[in-house]
Image: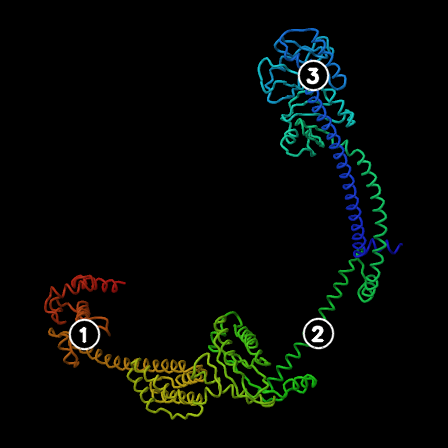
Amino acid sequence: MRITMDRLVRYKAFQKLAISYFLLILLTVSLLSTYLFYFFSMSAVKEIDRNSKAMLSQISYASDVVYNQAMTIGNSLLTQPEITSFLNDTEEDKTRNYHVFQQLSQIQSAYPYIYSIGIYRPSTKTVVDTAGLPFDSSLYAISAEQYMEFYPRSLTVPNRNNDAPLQFLTFLLYPNYSLRTTSNPLIYINVEEQSILTTIRKIGKADSANNVFVINNEGKVLSHTDSNLFLEDLSRTPYVQQILSQDETENSFTANIHNEKHLITYVKSEEMNWYFVSVTPYSSLIYNIDHLRNVTMLVTGGIVLIGLLVSIFLSKSIYRPLSTLFEKIIQNSATLKSPIIDEYQVMAEMFTTLEEREKSMQFVISRSSRTIREHYLHSLIRSNSLETSVPGELIRDIDEELSASYFCVIVFKIDDLEPARGGTEGGQMPLMRFALGNIAMEMLEPLGACDYLITGENEAVAICRYMKNERPEELKPALRNVQGFLNRYFKLTVSIGVGDMSYGRKNISFSYTSAQQYVKYRLIYGKESILDAQTTRSHIMTTVNYPVDGEKRLIEAVQSGKPDFVQDATEQFIEQISSGSVNQVITYSIQLMLSLLKHFDYLQHLPDSNFNEYLDVVTDIEAAENLSEIKDIFIRYCNNICALIEEKNHWINAQKHNIVIEKVQNYIQEHYAEPNLSLELVSNIAGLSPSYLGKLFKGAIRQSFSEYLNHIRLEKAKELLTSTNETAANISESVGIYNAPYFSTLFKKKYSLSPSAFREQESMKKKKMVND
């Protein structure tokens, strides 16, 4: 017991088991007890409701009997001659009145619940009433709509009933209903309201706690256990409105009256349209049920205590296998020092650790096997020997799988390597190779077993195994699907080389080599080509001579310096070599580059730089993936040569022009004092036209010929003004300007001073220097 209590306090799993069993027992007992209590209480309420309906039905039946007997009394009175004669008399006869009184009294004695029977004859205003009641004129004022009418009323008679009102349920009979006039006689039968109440109490055994009453179809009280409510209008009471609005002849429902729940039961009379209603507080109906509830709760509590013990016992039995396993786990793990132990968490952690170890081992084994298989296949396609450290058992398994099979190696070359290499850091090439492998395996495996290898940065290989020495017809459509899928979803183009069929794993390298040779022909066929022996046969079997005339044509086009000629010559050269093999195309392209290098080597100032550029271009040609790239390389290289030729021509012309300009400048320096010196004169000496020399001179000196000549003359004049005492007019003539005012204007415009002001300024500067 101590061990069990210790587990209950310390071990979470044992606690959960015990609590689960206890809650299960508690829930079961609670639901069962609640259901039984609810079932018994509802049965009791239904039984009470059924008894109330039965009681009200009996009361209703009794009222129908009263109604039928009233009809019987009225009909029997009309069959007696003395009564008929009394009704038809027009004169008062007290003897006859007495005989009628005795007959009415004799009839009344047979019906104890009838208070009185009366006849009223309006012609003589004679009233015969067995109880001696005066005639109530309100009875005759009722508008009769049928042979018998019913009229509840309250009548006060002096010295009767302690002067309290008599409460009657009066039945009115009209003997001459069909010939209704103001003089027709009236028979009335008074039934005391208390007689209905007495009938209710006898049949229903109602006590003061019950509220039993009778109402008509207008909601007016005809009889009530509370006599003060006689003729009370209850039509506005909600539960009475509900009764009057229903079509059922009997029913029951619950309603809140003065904030207390009541059971309403009613039965409708078939003859008189009366409603016999019983209103009983709900608490009085379930008084005995409260005792039943207390007993039920007591029994439930006892069962719950027993359930607690049972739950501990069941938990102990169920927990035994778990405790045995948990104790073994604790022995292999560190000591648990926590006061509360979650066994499931401890075991889950232990099992998770074991599972992770197993997954890690499986992953290592799987990856090792896959890596060994890839290395083995790499060695097969390259005819290399595998490392001896590889387990022989794995190699034997792979050999058995690859034996007795025909192989076809398919080489995938990713086009446009540089764009594919870009993107995020590290490039997108690994992602592209991964996507290529998945798509290729998915498309090719339905045709036969297949292995996927990555053999280069932009190259991947699929090694397909077939049972027959022929490729499936669906192979090329499958490869087209691979290309379409990659282009559509990854914007990636792939060229494919399909190797020759080979038998046995030792000959896989031959198929791989042939596939590599075929895929090189994408240089000629362009991107997204599928190339095999049949496609490339015409190029392999064709020998093309080096197009010397094409080389000469291209060199002449470069020398012409016209880009259109260069492009046409390049296209013709590419077209001439494109019918040959890939090796011939590459070789002849490099040979053409060498010829261009030699022919235009004179254009380069640094021969080493020129040769390096040539090597870069050769590398680009060897790496080109199609003829369009080679053509662009040629055009780019030739355009560079054209630019160099044009630059050299400009330089030569510039050198020639510099000599002419220098010669003109020297001539001006020597002959500036000649008044007839002009551009036309100098152009004759230079051997050029005046306009061309003028443009050339201005382009080199940034001044026109006349501006430069005036500049030289004014500078000489400025020297003479500071070094001599000659007049400005003489100095003007000495520098070739014979118009003195024009000379002054030019001098002032250039130096912002007149010649005299300039001489004075310079003189003052000299004096100041001497004084200093």
Identify the residue at the far right of this view.
1
Three-letter amino acid code of the residue under disc 3: Gln
Q: Quadrant of residue 646?
A: bottom left
Q: Residues within 10 Å of mark 2 (few under 14, many from 20)?
A: few
For the residue pair 622 and 195, the one nearer the viewer reads as 195
Q: Residues within 10 Å of mark 1 (few under 14, many from 20)?
A: some
In this rendering, position of residue 736 left or right of residue 455: left
Q: Quadrant of the N terminus?
A: bottom right
List x then y, in percent, for residue 13: 79, 57
User: What residue is at 51 percent from the left and 86 percent from the top?
Assistant: 516
Identify the residue at the far front of this view.
81
For the residue labelled by badge 3, is the local secondary structure a helix, a strand or a loop? loop
The answer to whether residue 24 is above or below residue 353 is: above
List x then y, in percent, for residue 288: 81, 34
Cα separation between marks 2 and 3: 122 Å
Q: Residues within 10 Å of mark 3 (few under 14, many from 20)?
A: few
Cα separation between marks 3 and 1: 167 Å
List x then y, in percent, for residue 654: 26, 79
Mark before the other along the chain sequence, 2 or 1: 2
Three-letter amino acid code of the residue under disc 2: Met
The answer to whether residue 482 is above or below residue 270 is: below
Mark before the other along the chain sequence, 3 or 1: 3
Residue 694, label in figure: 1
Q: Which residue is mark 3?
A: 80
Q: Which residue is mark 2?
A: 361
